Image (cartoon, helix red, strand yellow):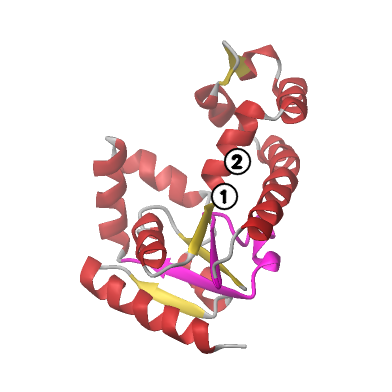
Amino acid sequence: MKIVGLTGGIGSGKSTVLTYFKELGAATFIADIEAKQLMNTNAELIKEITFLFGSEAYKNGILNRSYISEIVFNNKAKLAKLNALVHPKVRAHFENFTKTTKAEIVIYEAAILFESGSHNLCDYVITVTADFEERIKRVMLRDQTDKEAVMQRIKHQLNDEAKVLKSDFVITNNTFQSAKEQVKTIFEILLKLN
């Protein structure tokens, strides 16, 4: 089994690329979705997050994401503490996931793969890139938000150049057809690697 990290900036098209890998037979694990699920279901994590952010962290038993986001986007120390609580739980969940899959290739998708240290779980890393303006347009359309809000989120992510330097493969996702072809090529290469 090969564990392959998949990352890229907001709007780069990681989800689309992940779908292409899944179509080829890879098992897929989306760290962000798993993290959100664990923050709502893991009793220990709920207790720790409530202790860190106060009783407003949860509304009717569900994580108050807008409240938490407002705090962590303006307080790097709180963000680091939140990540220190969540990432180990996601890693443990991923390790269990890898024990139950029979796929030759497992894709671990995470927006903050390098920032969280999760790239250390991976045999190879792929970064998905796209033209900057295209990324902004995609996020504005997807999230029904304005350019300023998108730029704020981009500012909090490691830039593409830094990710590319740390990666084994790069997929340029400016058109879906081109991205699909690149995924197929990389998938075939991965199958042949020891």
Label 2 vs label 1: CA separation? Answer: 6 Å
Give the residue drawn at x 56%, y 88%: 193
Q: Is residue 175 visible?
A: no
> Dot 2: what SS?
helix
Specify the amino acid type for callout 1.
Ala
Q: In the visual, does 125 lie left or right of 93?
A: left
Q: Quadrant of residue 133?
A: bottom left
Residue 169, position as x, y percentages in the image: 48, 79
* Amino acid type of the residue tagged 2 in the rendering: Ala
- The correct choice, above or below, for 154 with respect to 59 in the image is below
Which image quarter holds the C terminus?
bottom right
Q: Write the residue at 57% across / 34% down.
A: 37
- Give the image location of residue 89, x and y in percent: 72, 43
| Circle 1: element type | helix
The answer to whether one can see residue 1 in this image is yes
Residue at 62 percent across and 73 percent down: it is 1
Q: Name above or below for residue 15 compared with residue 179.
A: above
> Foreground: 93 or 115?
93
**Dot 1, crowdedness within 10 Å: few (<14), some or many (≥20)?**
many
Contact, mark 2 vs mark 1 (Cβ under 8 Å): yes
Q: Which residue is at a point 41% across and 53% down the rendered structure image?
A: 10
Reply yes or no: does residue 47 show up in magenta. Answer: no
Residue interval drawn in magenta: 104-130
Magenta span contains residue 108: yes
From what the image shows, is residue 120 above or below residue 184?
Answer: above
Q: To which quarter of the image does residue 171 belong?
A: bottom left
Residue at image mark 1: 31
Label 2, residues with CA under 10 Å away: few <14, some 14-19, many ≥20: many
Q: Which of 66/33 is in front?
A: 33
Q: Which residue has dot 2 on it? A: 35
Residue 128: percent from the left, percent from the top? 41, 67
